[in-house]
Amino acid sequence: MPVLALVKQLRDGKPPVKGWVDVGTEVVTKDNVDTMYTRESDVAAMQKFYADYISKNFGDLNALQKPLPQH
C-alpha cells in the first residue's frame, strides 16, 4: 500500500494518506489452501489477482484512511 500511495501521489497528484488504511488479512484454511497455493505459485495469476483486488478494494486510499491512535 505504501507504494500504491506514492504512485497515486506522483502520477495522479492525489495527496498522501495521513492516517492508516486497514488492509485486512487473508486466512489460509484447509478449504482454500489449494486455490491460494495455485494462485501464489503462478506469477501471472498472482499479479492478476492482486491487481484486481487492489483496484476493487483500494481505489481511493484517502477515503479509507482512519486516524492514527492517540497516545
Image (spheres, rainbow, N blue to C red):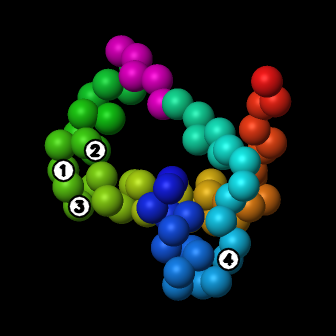
- Read off the magenta span: 26-30
- Label 4 SS: loop
> Answer yes or no: do the residues labelled 4 and 3 have beta carbons within 8 Å?
no
Question: What amino acid type is highlighted by mark number 4?
Answer: Lys
- Label 2 SS: helix
**For the view shown, which residue lies furthest in the front direction?**
71
Q: Which residue corresponds to mark 2?
A: 39
Q: Tell me the number on the disc at residue 42.
A: 1
> Answer yes or no: do the residues labelled 3 and 1 have beta carbons within 8 Å?
yes
Along the viewing direction, whichever of 61 and 10 lies nearer the viewer: 10
Question: What amino acid type is highlighted by mark number 3?
Answer: Ala
Q: Is residue 52 left or right of residue 28?
A: right
Instruction: Give the spatial CA distance, label 3 vs label 2.
Output: 8 Å
Q: Is residue 10 above or below residue 34?
A: below
Q: Is residue 13 left or right of residue 19?
A: left
Question: What amino acid type is highlighted by mark number 1?
Answer: Asp
Q: Is residue 46 above or below residue 55?
A: above
Q: Which residue corresponds to mark 3?
A: 44
Mark 1: few, some, or many residues within 10 Å (few <14, many ≥20)? Answer: few
Residue drawn at 80 percent across, 42 percent down: 67
Instruction: Give the spatial CA distance, label 3 vs label 1.
Output: 6 Å
Mark 3: few, some, or many residues within 10 Å (few <14, many ≥20)? Answer: few
- Label 1 or label 4, whichever comes before in sequence order: 4
User: Percent position (x, y) of residue 66?
Assistant: 78, 44
Magenta-drawn stretch, dominant element (helix, strand or loop): loop
Q: Tell me the number on the disc at residue 14.
A: 4
Question: What amino acid type is highlighted by mark number 2?
Answer: Arg
- Label 4 or label 3, whichever comes before in sequence order: 4
Residue drawn at 50 percent across, 64 percent down: 4
- Label 1 SS: loop
- How many circles with numbers are drawn on the protein? 4
